[in-house]
Amino acid sequence: MEYLTENSAETKEVGIGLSQQLKLKKGALIFGLKGDLGAGKTTFLQGFAKGLGIKDKITSPTFVIMNRFPIKKGKFRNFYHLDCYRVENYKEIENIGIKEIISDSKNIVCIEWPEKIKRIIPKDVPFIRFDILEGDKRKITIDYGE
Ligand code: ADP
Ligand code: MG
């Protein structure tokens, strides 16, 4: 699925859209968000979290790798936002209990810079790609994999 957006509000709308079509699966529902700095990954997740009924503002965690937000309605219980841009060693991620988090089907886990922690991400995880086009235009590609 491919979307073209012209401003951050439109990117948030695409995030809201995705939040409305989530299905429970065996482990956590995981999405990897790929794209350069400033491409709109966090902006997308602001919409996504809003769509889940989360009131807190999603920001780029600078000093922490991960933030957890409780989900009050629906099938899921927790939204985890990870930003692995600064992760150098996948042990850092192991130490925060990632294995338990991704094995719980009540969790939604969105990971910016999933390339940095490849070895702990299941192979069938869907990726969302953000490409910066001219000006404020962005291309968002959701690849559900198989
Ligand atoms: P990332 O998390 O990928 O590093 P952010 O979402 O933090 O990116 O930042 C995206 C920046 O680009 C924000 O400053 C946002 O206002 C700006 N922007 C401009 N156009 C768009 C767009 N179409 N979609 C998303 N963000 C946009
Ligand atoms: Mg970000």
Image (cartoon, grey):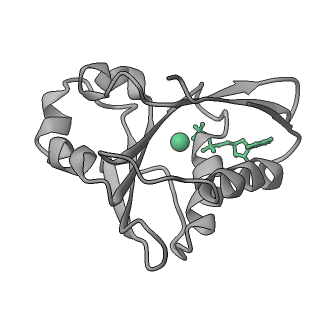
In the drawing, does residue 114 fall left or right of residue 53? left
In the drawing, does residue 77 fall left or right of residue 43? left
Between 65 and 109, the residue placed more toward the observer is: 109
In the drawing, does residue 98 fall left or right of residue 24? left
The residue at the point 75 percent across, 47 percent down is 11
The residue at the point 51 percent across, 73 percent down is 56
Between 134 and 143, the residue placed more toward the observer is: 143
Q: Where residue 43 sits in the image (x, y, percent)? A: 64, 50
Count all numbered tags in the image, as a single digit. Answer: 0
In the drawing, does residue 48 fall left or right of residue 123? right
Q: Where residue 38 sits in the image (x, y, percent)? A: 64, 35
Q: Where residue 9 sits in the image (x, y, percent)? A: 80, 55
- Determine the image quadrant of residue 6: top right
The residue at the point 55 percent across, 76 percent down is 55
Between 48 and 59, the residue placed more toward the observer is: 48
The residue at the point 67 percent across, 33 percent down is 39
- Determine the image quadrant of residue 77: bottom left
